Amino acid sequence: MRILNKEVWWSMGAQKIVVIGTGYVGLTTGACMAHLGHEVICVDNDETKINSIRRGILPIYEENLSELVTQGCDAGNLSFTTNLSDAIPDTNFVFLCLPTPTSDDGSADITAIIGVVADIRTHLKSGAVVVNKSTVPVNSANSLVELINRSDIDVVSNPEFLREGSAVRDFLMPDRIVVGCVNPMAGHRVASLYENVASPIVLTDFASAETIKYMANSYLAMRISFINEVASFCHSIGADVLEVVKGLTLDKRIGATFLMPGPGWGGSCFPKDTRAISRGADLTGERLELIETAIATNTKHQLRIVKLITDLAGNNPTTSRVCLLGLTFKAGTDDVRESPALIIGQALVSEGFSVVAYDPMQPRIPTHQIALVGTIEEALRGADVVVVATEWEEFSSLAAENYADAMRGKLLFDLRYVLPREKFAAVGLEVITLGQRPIREIGK
Ligand code: NAD
């Protein structure tokens, strides 16, 4: 592994780039690469999506993304198409930002990537570089080299680390850029696309680049599972988990990020990627038992939350109405893929509760059993129990009196630790958090 020193780079100037897959990663990559001065064409096989972007309506919510897309389109160096064969022959770099969902056995399904690469391989211009940004099983880049089977084309692994909610910032100001390659010249060419990004470039081999991506997500998921387990421990012995978090995170060896208890990790990456790397390791006979445990612990944690809610609130679930605040897997995104809010909401439905949900993003959800309403007031009206599942500011900024006026019951489960518990206690409501003693007991 080498950390590239930018002073020894040659500058390539603006390059022609095609980005295939225009979702969270692809749209961000396309818009940011255009912002960095390159000439970018984004391709997707979803015609509705492309037409909508062309009309200025983005299919996803991401801070500052809409502005960058507009800037790029207005400047003439960002465009969108469904026509792969028109875009490919003239490009120097093809970025693959395609989905790699979980397959039946838990591994990552790279069918979309294989299909696209098989389609484009003969159309690639000599000297072009195929850059994979999707999260793929270790050794996938080697498979792409074999599939392309052309000595004049290079493959580079350039895993993406952006977080939904801060995707543009993360892309333009990443902690590092990882470039995995066999041919260092191709690695340098990809690195120099990021010439105007002030971040260290880690130049390494294919397998290490692919492994860095999986281990980053697995480690962060493990940290969250760890602190969730600490929250349960605090709950049982009467310690305050937020005090414990403060005491832990001041330790520089531990650090402050990804150490906040909550409803368990979710989203489009952590669950899928931990499953995939565990499955991949299983196949090699070298099990990753800590990661396997984190996956199991996450499920157990969510079941524990559902039991806590049911035990404390569910005298008669069939007549109880739960108001679920938040559906996205975290604030700042409209993504509900494997969202803990949905998992917990669905489990409460199975327990017999009637669940009414509100989320400021008004996301489309894959169930009709949770009723989605348009305002927080509507969701709170007549609720016996409130569950705060996503840390949207709207939930913590609404006055406790408004909750009290709208609710029928008196219990709130704050899975994100965002509600001011004393203020709620003052209006006769009880906010329950995992790993903190109830306000009424403190001081006794
Ligand atoms: P996504 O589902 O948002 O986007 C994928 C896009 O690819 C969709 O627009 C889809 O229509 C398009 N597509 C599918 N098949 C296609 C084909 N044959 N031709 C053209 N377009 C096609 O997915 P995403 O969240 O952007 O993730 C993409 C990859 O990046 C995954 O491997 C993911 O693990 C990884 N990743 C995601 C994130 C994240 O936060 N979402 C962060 C880092 C890495």
Image (cartoon, rainbow, N blue to C red):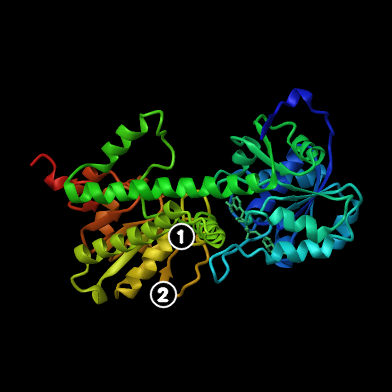
| Separation (CA) of disc 2 from disc 1 | 15 Å
The relative height of residue 14 versus residue 393 in the rendered view (above or below) is above
From the top left corner, tell me how far across and down residue 44 is, in percent: 74, 61
Query: CB under 8 Å between callouts 2 and 1?
Result: no
**Residue 233's x, y, as percent?**
24, 49
443 sits to left or right of 63: left
Q: Nearer the viewer, residue 322 or 272?
A: 272
* Number of residues whose C-alpha sits closer than 10 Å to that of mark 2, classed few (under 14), some (14–19) or many (20 or more): some
Screen quadrant of the N terminus: top right
User: 10 Å neighbourhood of mark 1: few (<14), some, or many (≥20)?
Assistant: many
**Quarter of the figure that contains the C terminus:** top left
Secondary structure type for disc 1:
loop
Amino acid at the residue labelled 1: Ser
Q: Quadrant of residue 420?
A: top left
What's the mark number on residue 369?
2
Which residue: 40% across, 56% down? 293
Residue 101 is left or right of residue 413, and the answer is: right
**Residue at the spot of label 1:** 339
- Where is residue 230 drawn, in percent x and y? 29, 46
Residue 157 placement, left or right of 430? right
Residue furthest toward the left?
444
Position of residue 374 measured from the top left corner of the image (x, y, whole percent)? 45, 63
Secondary structure type for disc 2:
loop
